[in-house]
Amino acid sequence: MDLSSLSLAALRRRFVDGGQSLSAEEEAALEAEPRAGARAVLAAVRRRRQENRAEGQRLRHLLRFETDLWERGVVHVAGVDEAGMGTLAGPVVAAAAILPHDFRPRGLDDSKKLDEKERDRLAAEVKAGAVAWALGSASPGEIDKLNIYRAGLLAMRRAVEALSCRPEQLLVDARRIPELRIPQQGIVKGDAKSLSIAAASVLAKTARDALMVEMDAAHPGYGFAKHKGYSAPEHVEALRRLGPCPTHRRTFAPVREALAGGPAQRTLW
């Protein structure tokens, strides 16, 4: 193709906006182009190529735990993670995800490193591409009864047990689930080290955030849709002003304090 016959706008539409790759001949032609705009197109294509290589390397690194297991004949590896351990309100939500061996969703990472738009996009990709995925939760009442650590384990166990395909191995963020008779490995900061755990972290976070938006409609005035139940200053102030609502965790210190001194009419237990 004679690229010199194409306008700069056409070159950009084809090779930058459209993402079309360059053949060796086309790359050489652009490099020899006298037009600065054509050489800028070439630079953009090379940057994209370099970014794709870097992302491929990052994803391969995130699959090192899974790859080791796959090479040993373990087919179905589930990543497990939770969201909402440190909030003052709402359930703790866990997710489990079994990924195909060739699944490489661009940008997938620890959910805390992603903005809301990226988390939503990646959650949809994981749900569409996973071998199996499932959610589990523990309610505020269960958190108050069991304590938050044990409630988190309960939510993760429920997520694993809800999978449509039984995993042969679990990769769990920072802990092990003692009630499950499945081989498992706890990985500290696993949502940043394992692609399967990262997938579970995104599923758990997006599911819990959606629940807290629903809680905001059911219990207005606390700002759940904004802070998702965490102890933001406006949440603590609303607790003092309104008293706790049914989705608050009564054993958490700011909620206990509000129960002791807040308006009784809002503590509907």
Image (cartoon, rainbow, N blue to C red):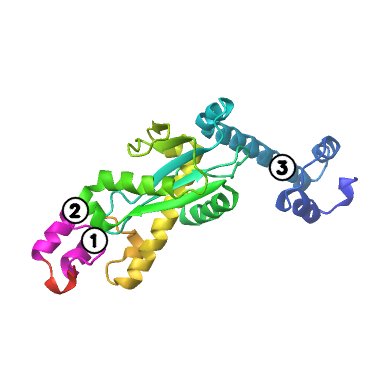
Residue 56, horizontal then vertical, whole percent: 61, 36
SS of the residue under disc 1? loop
Against 29, is 132 above or below?
Answer: below
| Contact check, label 1 and label 2, Cβ < 8 Å | yes
Amino acid type, callout 3: Val
Q: Quadrant of residue 40?
A: top right
Q: Give the CA distance from mark 2 to mark 3.
A: 53 Å
Going by the numbered disc 2, the residue's amino acid type is: Phe
Q: In percent of the image, x 25 and y 54: which residue is there?
A: 142
Q: Which residue is mark 3?
A: 45
Residue 231 painted magenta: no
Residue 227 visible: yes
Residue that carries the numbered disc 2 in the rendered image: 252
Q: Within 10 Å of the Cα at label 3, are there few (<14), some (14-19), or many (20+) other Cα atoms? A: many
Residue 179 horizontal/vertical position (percent): 33, 39
Label 1, label 3: how many angstroms apart (C-alpha)? 51 Å
Q: Which label sits on residue 248?
A: 1
Q: Is residue 250 above or below residue 53?
A: below
Q: Amino acid at mark 1?
A: His
Q: Which residues are magenta?
A: 235-261
